[in-house]
Image (cartoon, helix red, strand yellow):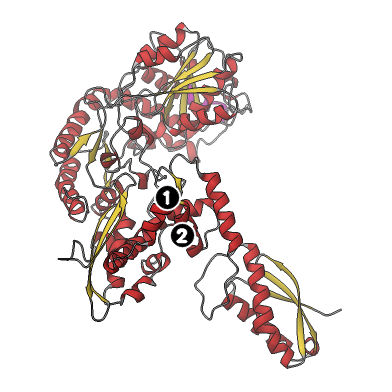
Amino acid sequence: MKKVIYADNNATTAVAPEVFEAMRPFFTERYGNPSSIHTFGADLSREIERARAHVARLLGAEHDTEIVFTSCGTESDNTAIRSALASRPKRRRVVTTRVEHPAVLTLARFLEHEGYEVTYLPVDGRGLLKLEELRAAMDENVAVVSIMAANNETGVLLPVEEAGHIAHEFEAIFHTDAVQAAGKVPVSLASGAIDLLSISGHKIHAPKGVGALYVRRGLRFRPFMLGGHQERGRRGGTENVPGIVGLGEAARLAVAHAGEEQGRVRLLRDRLEKSLLAISDSRLNGDLERRLPGTTNVSFKKVEGEAILLHLNEHGICASSGSACTSGSLEPSHVLRAMGVPFQFAHGSIRFSLGRFNTDADVDAIIEVMPGIIETLREISPFKD
Amino acid sequence: MGWDYTEKVKDHFLHPRNVGRVENPDGVGEVGSIACGDALTLTIKVDKAADRIEEAKFQTFGCGSAIASSSVLTEMIKGKTLDEALKITNQDIADFLGGLPKEKMHCSVMGREALEAAVANYRGQKSPKDHEEEGGRMVCFCFGVTEEKIRRVARENRLETVEDVTNYTKAGGGCGSCLDEIERILEEVRAEAPPEKPKAAPAPRKLTNIQRIALVNEVLDQEVRPQLQKDGGDLELIDIDGTRVTIRLVAHCSGCRAAGLTSIWIQEKLREIVDPAIVLEVEEEG
């Protein structure tokens, strides 16, 4: 197989070697059930609690018990929003944004069928959320406000702490999907603005199949998965011990590497972005400043994104696009549409998301082929001028 | 969602044939738009005496399968007379590429439309697409698809579900508010279409249960029973359950030593014309 240049870290990440090593014993040697009475199983509880402490530290949670392990970011989101609705039973409104991940948007649409009124807040042309819009949408009937911390497609950061305070003025519960933000940018829990926060393991170099939900102490909570007494009754189902241990180790590493995202990864991204924007008729999708350090989303006028990805694929380069042909529908991504990106740009968007394992050589390789790919595709386009 | 593209699609995408515009084209077909996410301009040079396409070139904005469909189209029509070229269906384009993912069938439809438009342009006529756009009632406003186009593509490709219609025409792929309407149109198209006469070598296709039952009946009545009756026999159709067809051989046939061979022959006939998955069961008489 030819060398793969992986620049799609917002989709998923490689399991870090340290994470893999930490998990290894928990498959074939220490495979017990933490709920068992024998020490072979029961000792595993200690491993889970160690992982919990690492995740709490990564998120800046005050108490380890505020962390509940789940199976993925989507489960965390569903759990959080359902629990919030259950603890405000008289309220019938939900406020979220038009740029959320499908894990929240699909649930929101489903809630509409259940009779909830859902408000989808707009974003501006740079993907930013205006807090006045949130304030204007609030009233005493809002049960939960759910706003993502960082957008997966553009990397744009949303002002979740301020949004949380506004939600609290109306005694609504505030949830944030921090799947993309966690481990990359600080999301502060200290001020108490955030009641519930979702993360996913596989975005931070842990394996797929494990996630976590932060639940602020004192918040009324209703489990989503009903079953055994695991996770102090908050999430039924035998614990995914290897996954949880992996997430713990990944969280520990994320803390250790925190400076790297803002430093080395950001520099790589900036260098890549600069050369992409040097190609004619290109534009950046998303705010230049308020963004994840590793993400760049650039559109090329009158070129179709899937075609770009196919060419990149020939060079072993992995990226994503918000074009219709790759969004699984016939329209460009809901995020780019919400930002009002013109059609002639929206179909030609491409996202590179860099991470801990990307090198200067990766960026060089992308920079080397991109201008030629865009030129080739423009050659065969009927819209030359 | 990964790419389920054949080697042929990849080849035509990475090495597109006949890119550009022919000089002083005799016919130009322009379909699609930037807003829709794909667009194709086909230009042709026609040998007027022979009514033959001498040269064909394309320019395409779109995904991998749109580019590959355009490229392969130019290869398919070169050297053909206009009438021969017009016989090329969107399914032919897809088949030539070794198949397209079903969500991408609209790319082959776009190729076919560009061909019709280019030929009509040469002949100074209006293309079916123009007719549809001018006289047609818009059903899908997101992608500008008319009722006439939906009917035509559904008929030509024997589309069965609303999802098929979206895959082939894009209609319904935006806001989704026209999906009920598409369902209604599709029901009408299905109702109007009588099962086609069995052909000698029909293209493989997906049949609905109703279509399959009708076709099995037709084959048995027109092809099989006359043969059996010549030998003084006959058959009764007992049941059709999916692809399982149960018959009873009657009179002369039932006790005949060749009955086994007869039933194999009937099964082959049904497989050939109706569906290769047909399994024939012969009930014993009495």
Q: Residue at x 16, y 42 (%)?
A: A361
Q: Residue at x 19, y 66 (%)?
A: B25
Q: Is residue B156 left or right of residue A227?
A: left
Q: Is disc 1 surrounded by few (<14), some (14 to 19) or many (20+) residues within 10 Å?
A: many
Residue A61 visible in the displayed image? no
Farthest residue to the bottom: give it.
B231
Percent of width and height locating residue A102:
45, 33
Determine if the magenta segment contains residue B42. Answer: no
Determine if the magenta segment contains residue A46. Answer: yes
Q: Provide the residue designation for mark 1.
A: B145
The chain under label 1 reads B
Farthest residue to the top: give it.
A169
Q: Amino acid at mark 1?
A: Val
Disc 1 secondary structure class: strand
Above or below residue A80? Residue A285 is: below
Q: Amino acid at mark 2?
A: Val
Q: Is residue A379 left or right of residue A86?
A: left
| Among numbered discs 1 and 2, the one appearing first in the sequence | 1
Percent of width and height locating residue A322:
33, 40
Above or below residue A193? Residue A296 is: below
Percent of width and height locating residue B143:
39, 46
Per the rendered image, the range of residues in magenta is A39-49
Percent of width and height locating residue A311:
25, 52
Work out whether disc 1 and disc 2 sit on a shared chain. Answer: yes
Disc 2 secondary structure class: helix
Of A288 and A191, nearer the camera is A288
Q: Provide the residue designation for mark 2.
A: B153
The chain under label 2 reads B
Q: Is disc 2 surrounded by few (<14), some (14 to 19) or many (20+) residues within 10 Å?
A: some
